[in-house]
Amino acid sequence: MKQGIYSSKAPHPIGAYSPAVKAGGWIFVSGQGPEDPITHEVKGKTIEEQTQYALENLLAVLAEAGAKPADVVQVHVFLRDLNDFSRFNKVYAQYFPDPKPARTTVGCNLINDIMIEMDAIALVEQ
């Protein structure tokens, strides 16, 4: 059985998808960016600020599903500019305890003024 997960502390989707889906002990979080949960406006002018806001949205969805940062097993990160990697990584590293999740980071075109988007997979005890 799967369950859609929505958090009032993270943006609700504009498209046809759930912010996260919980199936068994697995939680699959859709891409989260640096959006304001109410207005959907992009927050932050630097990669550090946008990374912080994107992670706060991602962790809000995880918390709604009953997970914490230590439960995250994999993260996919999409950066507009791969030259921002080291600056992004410094902020990211503060959010996840050791052992850090497995991670893939790729460069891609992102809409509007978004510099970063990330999704995650977490596993929680049932």
Image: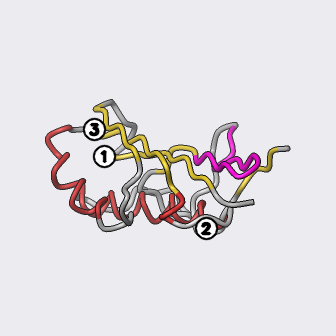
Q: Label 1 crowding class (10 Å Cα cut-off): few <14, some 14-19, many 20+? A: many
Q: How far apart are marks 3 and 2 (CA)?
A: 27 Å
Q: Are marks 1 and 3 in contact (CB under 8 Å)?
A: yes
At which x and y percent is residue 88? Answer: 24, 54
Residue position for label 3 = 80
| Residue 19 within the magenta-colored segment of the rendering | yes
Q: From the viewer's perspective, is 4 left or right of 58?
A: right
Q: From the viewer's perspective, is 110 left or right of 32?
A: left
Residue position for label 2 = 63
At which x and y percent is residue 3? Answer: 79, 50
Residue type at numbered disc 1: Met
Q: In which quarter of the image is residue 64?
A: bottom right
| Residue 18 within the magenta-colored segment of the rendering | yes
Question: Mark 3 or mark 2, which has the lower sequence index?
Answer: 2
Q: Are marks 3 and 2 in contact (CB under 8 Å)?
A: no
At which x and y percent is residue 44? Answer: 31, 62
Q: How many marks?
A: 3
Q: Quadrant of residue 76?
A: top left
- Residue at 61% x, 64% y is 67
At which x and y percent is residue 81? Answer: 21, 38
Q: Is residue 16 above or below residue 69?
A: above
Residue type at numbered disc 2: Ala
Question: Mark 1 or mark 3, which has the lower sequence index?
Answer: 3
Q: What stretch is highlighted in magenta?
A: 17-29
Which secondary structure lies at badge 3? loop
- Residue at 37% x, 36% y is 110
Residue position for label 1 = 115
- Which quarter of the rendering shows the C terminus? bottom right
- Residue at 42% x, 60% y is 55
